[in-house]
Image (cartoon, rainbow, N blue to C red):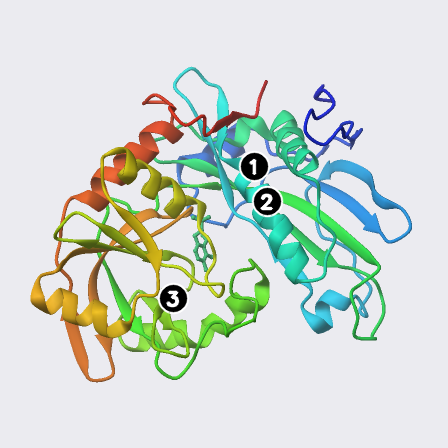
Amino acid sequence: MTTIDTDPDTGLDPLEFAVTRNLAAKSNADRDAILASPGFGQSFTDHMVDICWSVRGGWHRPRVSPYGPISLDPAAAVLHYGQEIFEGIKAYRHADGSVHTFRPDQNGRRLQRSARRLALPELPVPYFLQSLRELIAVDGAWVPSGEDQSLYLRPFMFAKEAFLGVRPAHKVAYYLIASPAGAYFKGGVKPVSIWLSEDYSRAGKGGTGAAKTGGNYAASLLPQSEAYENECDQVVFLDQDRNVEELGGMNVVFVYKDGSIVTPQSDSILEGITRDSLLQLARDRGHHVEGRNVPLTEWREGVASGDIVEVFACGTAAVVTPIGTLKGRDFIDEQPSGTLALELREELTNIQYGRAEDKHGWLYRLDA
Ligand SMILES: Cc1ncc(COP(=O)(O)O)c(C=O)c1O
């Protein structure tokens, strides 16, 4: 059990996790074989964390158990009404062997905002942080040490009460699983092609777009298939006023020729932690940064006139991806290529992997 002090901000005592070791844990050789080429989201570590919540008992029964199937009543509300939220965050191994994650307080707070919107209970941030540490305490050897490799951590929460009435569930489960992740781009970062979704939207005004909830991703799958049919890698969504929102799983950022940086901001967009960090690094370099509506016409005309000099997407999984092409039903706009996206990517990953000074105090050690 990791010893953690009472949280100074919330006064919460740490949870006492019951730890059951996985007797069928992978051998070192099997684990090393997986870590040599982990891909993304395919293999999982030996353990998982879960914490129960009920209206009566609050957060209780924190456990670390062998990774395995979850038993659910067929009437569990999540299976019918999709009351579910999740997070995505990575653990990085530094050259001295230590394991760190990046701005986990931000993920913990975003999980709380998602919970509020989905009428789920808010997991206190100190419990969220403790869950990450507990899993690393047993599965730390799963954090790979290869270039651009990481352990992807997937916290999630869902309504498990067996009840078919439509109301917020009275019983909920929080889980944390982890999956080793390889370099997203083998052989260097490549610009992606983006399909403009005209027929489908991801989120609506007052909807769940700003929450990290499964339904948003379910809604993005058909337009993503349309993107593939049109030989594009990703899809970009517009809002009802034809402002640019985001990709299915990444935020979008525009760089202007005067050095200013603009990113779509509205209550239907997920507030990316990668974006926030990159924009801070850009501010540190003296760039003016603005979050506001970006009409599609501004994007297309800006590229045509040369006002926009670079467009990139960002998120935890791929970090930063330059956008090479925007394709719509009746146009293909080649996007200008610049150097800022890749410079910021390098700067951010250098901090995450402990190769550069962490001036903003973004790193959080998980294995001590
Ligand atoms: C829809 C969506 N937008 C943006 C992001 C970027 O968020 P973050 O940088 O916190 O990973 C994600 C997740 O990666 C996402 O799923």
**Label 2, label 1: how far apart the Cα atoms are:** 6 Å
Q: Quadrant of residue 139?
A: top right
The reply to whether callout 1 and callout 3 are in contact (CB within 8 Å) is: no
Q: Name the residue carrying label 3.
A: 245
Q: What is the quadrant of the N terminus in the image?
A: top right
Q: Secondary structure at mark 3?
A: strand
**Label 1, label 3: how far apart the Cα atoms are:** 25 Å
Q: Name the residue carrying label 1.
A: 105
Asked whether 29 or 356 is in front, the reply is 356
In the drawing, does residue 249 fall left or right of residue 45?
left
Does mark 3's beta carbon lie closer than 8 Å to ligand 1?
Answer: no
Q: Name the residue carrying label 2.
A: 109
Q: Whole-percent x and y of residue 249?
A: 43, 59
Is residue 326 visible in the rendered structure shown here?
no
Under mark 2, the amino acid is Arg
User: Of callouts 2 and 3, which one flags the residue occurring earlier in the amino acid sequence?
Assistant: 2
The reply to whether callout 2 and callout 1 are in contact (CB within 8 Å) is: yes
Q: Whole-percent x and y of residue 32?
A: 47, 31
Point out the residue furthest to the left here: 305
**Label 2, label 3: how far apart the Cα atoms are:** 22 Å
